[in-house]
Amino acid sequence: MVSNQMGMVRTLYLRSIALKQLDITPTLSMGISLDHIVSIICAYLGGIVWTLWGPQYVFYLAAGLSLVNLYVAMHVKKQDGFNDMEIN
């Protein structure tokens, strides 16, 4: 459910910043492919951390990464002129 919500957020955000409507679909496709690759790598590395140091460190690492994502998201600047595209 959260994955679907993030997909909708990503699509709406991309539509609001895209310079051309034709760029949206290829960009979303590449994003999904990269998400899959990163997910596989994170699962592998999470298994290594779990095995070496214990399950609590996987969750500490995830919490830390979430805080980094929050910090980055809070510092994204809104640029003028990119909200003129109509979302259908």
Image (spheres, rainbow, N blue to C red):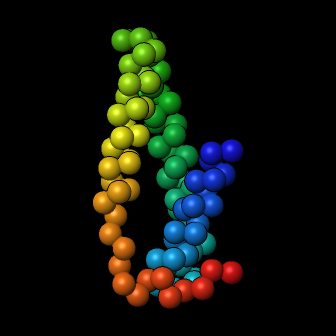
Q: Is residue 18 above or below residue 53?
A: below
Residue at the spot 37% in from the left edge and 28% down from the top edge: 61
* In front of the other: 47 or 10: 10
Q: Residue furthest front?
A: 74
**Quadrant (top left/top right/bottom left/bottom right) for the C terminus:** bottom right
Residue at the spot 41% in from the left edge and 40% down from the top edge: 66
Residue 54 appears in the rendering: yes
Residue 26 appears in the rendering: no
Q: Quadrant of residue 68?
A: top left
Percent x, y for residue 10? 55, 62
**Quadrant (top left/top right/bottom left/bottom right) for the N terminus:** top right
Percent x, y for residue 42? 46, 34
Q: Is residue 75 above or below residue 45?
A: below
* In front of the other: 78 or 58: 78
Percent x, y for residue 48? 42, 19
* In front of the other: 40 or 14: 14
Percent x, y for residue 65? 37, 38
Residue at the spot 55% in from the left edge and 46% down from the top edge: 36
Q: Quadrant of residue 24?
A: bottom right
